[in-house]
Amino acid sequence: MKNKILAKRYAQATLNTLPTEKYQDIFHQFEVMKNIIKTHPKLREIIRSKIVRNEQKLEFLRNILEGVENNDFWMRAFTVLILKNRSEIIGLFLHEFDILLKKTLRMKDVKLILANEHDNQTLDNIREEIEIFLDSKVLYEVQLDKNILGGFIAISDNKMIDASVLTSLHRFARRRVKW
């Protein structure tokens, strides 16, 4: 719990150092950063190591981030954590920073459940409707589930839009029983 609170504080402080016009750039790079950390398991080991000196950790990071857009921003963020001996919370920091940045940009992650695959135009139409409902930009992950028969179910945070054929049939059946 303590590490999560620390990660949130560092994420907020880091976001506060960023000019508003850079938010979108950093957001688009965020996936690159997550992939760099995922594809360099040695990076996690070195950064978390109690044996490796901070200067070595920073040099290793500098080499990996070379050529990454806005690498100065990322280096500053990681340097603060490393020099404050908080390198063990870098993963939590990235998670909290992602949440804050999306909230600031009014974006929401949505799990979109479909019965079948759809073309891009149909997905765009569904996304637009969900964005209107949530009053936010939507980043969706598609999951297929033939059990819903058709339509879609969209789940984000504590909201759900159930426009599935299965639910419509259940509603119809309940109304019909009351007649």
Image (cartoon, grey):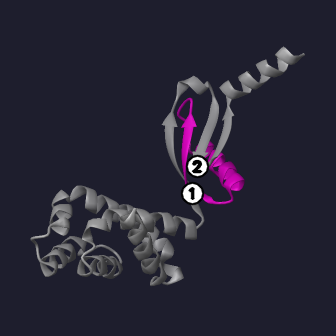
Q: Secondary structure at mark 2?
A: strand
Q: Position of residue 155 (x, y in %)?
A: 59, 44
Determine which quarter of the picture holds residue 9. bottom left
Q: 95 or 63: which is nearer to us?
A: 95
Three-letter code, disc 2: Ser
Q: Secondary structure at mark 1?
A: strand
Residue at point 66%, 25% (across, down)? 166
Residue at point 62%, 42% (across, down)? 122
Residue at point 67%, 55% (across, down)? 134
Tell me, yes or no, whether the two marked residues, 2 and 1, touch with CB atoms within 8 Å. Answer: yes
Q: Which residue is mark 1?
A: 108
Q: Earlier in the sequence, mark 2 or mark 1?
A: 1
The vertical placement of 150 against 17, above or below, is above
- Tell me if 30 is positioned left or right of 64 in this view: right
Q: Position of residue 7 (x, y in %)?
A: 39, 69
Three-letter code, disc 1: Lys
Question: From which residue to which does the magenta span run?
Answer: 109-138
Q: Which residue is mark 2?
A: 156
Q: 27 or 48: which is nearer to us?
A: 48
Q: Residues within 10 Å of mark 1 (few under 14, many from 20)?
A: some
